[in-house]
Amino acid sequence: MQMAQQVIRQVNCPNHCPEMKMGSDITSKVKIKDDYILKNGTASVYLQCFVKGTQVRVPTNIKVPPKQFNKVKERIRASHPQADDFNLILEEMLARVHEIRVKYRLGQIKLNPQVFKDMVLNSSINTDFLAYMNWKIDQRKTELAYGTYRHHRSTIGILKSWRSTLPFSNICEKLFFDFRKHLEAKGNNANTVGTKLKIIKTYLNAARADGFIFEMPEKSLKRLQVKSKVVALTSDELKRAIDLYRKQYLTDHHQQTLRCFLFSCFTGLRYSDVAQLNQEHIIGNYIIITPAKTKKTGKFVKIPLNAPAKSLLDLGAAKPLGKVISNVKMNFNLKVVAKYIGFENKLSFHASRHTFATMFLELGGSVEVLQTILGHSSIKQTMIYAHVVDKRREAQIDNFNRLLWKSP
């Protein structure tokens, strides 16, 4: 065991590794917190590091009686029964600090105290993109909307099921062309594939920004431009859905699903915003809410509360729409609703937002006003609905050709 310690020290660390001085931007020492003794008489051993002048304490998960720690040599005394194992752990962590220091000095990574600590505790962050992506997603958890966070988690889960590790050195165009084929073989459509690759590109860009050096696979991550199909109820289908809700033919959970769906048809709110809706969001005849999808921008939308939408609310309750089940269960229940109203396409909750947008324009609303209600950052996003309405109008005009005009 002692020979193993010496080999690690010789390969990974210079002789001055424990202190790492000589004007370095990163220094480290092994310390014991002997001012706080645990009930079992032990104290925690930790690395005291300084990163560009800022102290960083890195836990080692080693606890020994203070008398069995040699403060001069900064190691566990040989009298401790686990001295060899504990000292090996310390050597490995110090070797990791040295590796990080070398990469930093060579300009291969950028550092701040928190990033440094995480890299020491998880060495694979330095070499494995999957470990880095997993770590970065956790870092961004508070800034991402819940649905976005889950989507990012899902994406790395798919990557891990395809490759257990993904060293930065292996990243190339062919790798992600193969991953694209893998997703397509699993039955994912072009939009789903594009979304997954876009998420991966986000974290590859983050890694580059953090100083990691690798070949950026621009071509294989390029998102193909595929027009999304807008699925929306017609006015007749919406009327049948309203009639179904009023007659209360459905079971309680299907009735509640239809209630939430119709509310979105009259307001344009996404599922994530319907789920978070509470009494505080309703001010007079308006819904004022910061969309969960764009919460990091801090921008809110102000939606006039029309009579149909208002009739679906219990204004005296903390949750005016009652219990809102998960989006997955909601979409499952909407299969039953679709059969009742004669809706032939696959009905999902997001169709309610599309329904609101198309109906708004068909009833004479302007694209500019619709943009503000939907909270779109670009008018191009809103123009999709204008094209849908144009097609509907063309189809209605075409009725004259089919019913009243016969070509000679």
Image (cartoon, rainbow, N blue to C red):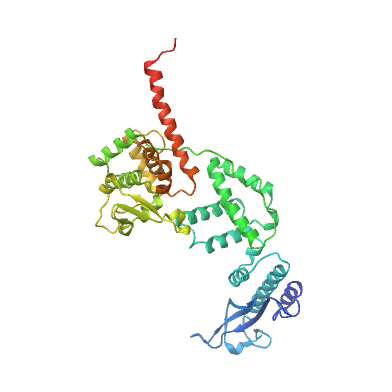
Query: Going 37% across and 18% down the picture, which residue do you hit?
Result: 403
Query: Going 44% across and 38% down the picture, which residue do you hit?
Result: 385
Please indicate whether residue 264 sits to the left or right of residue 83 in the image: left
The answer to which image quadrant residue 318 occupies is bottom left
Relative image position of residue 18 (x, y in whole percent)? 69, 80
Quadrant where the N terminus sits is bottom right
Count of numbered badges drawn on the protein? 0
Please indicate whether residue 192 sits to the left or right of residue 167 in the image: left
Of residues 33 and 234, the one drawn nearer to the viewer in this rendering = 234
Position above or below: 145 against 83: above
Relative image position of residue 40 (x, y in whole percent)? 50, 85
Please indicate whether residue 368 sits to the left or right of residue 242 in the image: right
Position above or below: 86 against 263: below
Query: Going 56% across and 44% down the picture, which residue do you hit?
Result: 193
Relative image position of residue 256 (x, y in whole percent)? 30, 47
Relative image position of residue 11 (x, y in whole percent)? 76, 72
The answer to which image quadrant residue 157 occupies is bottom right
Q: Residue furthest bottom?
A: 67
Quadrant where the C terminus sits is top left
Position above or below: 396 against 144: above
The answer to which image quadrant residue 280 occupies is bottom left
Query: Going 58% across and 54% down the picture, which residue do you hit?
Result: 202
Of residues 130 and 79, the one drawn nearer to the viewer in this rendering = 130
Of residues 266 and 224, the one drawn nearer to the viewer in this rendering = 266
Of residues 289 and 4, the one drawn nearer to the viewer in this rendering = 289
Position above or below: 288 against 399: below
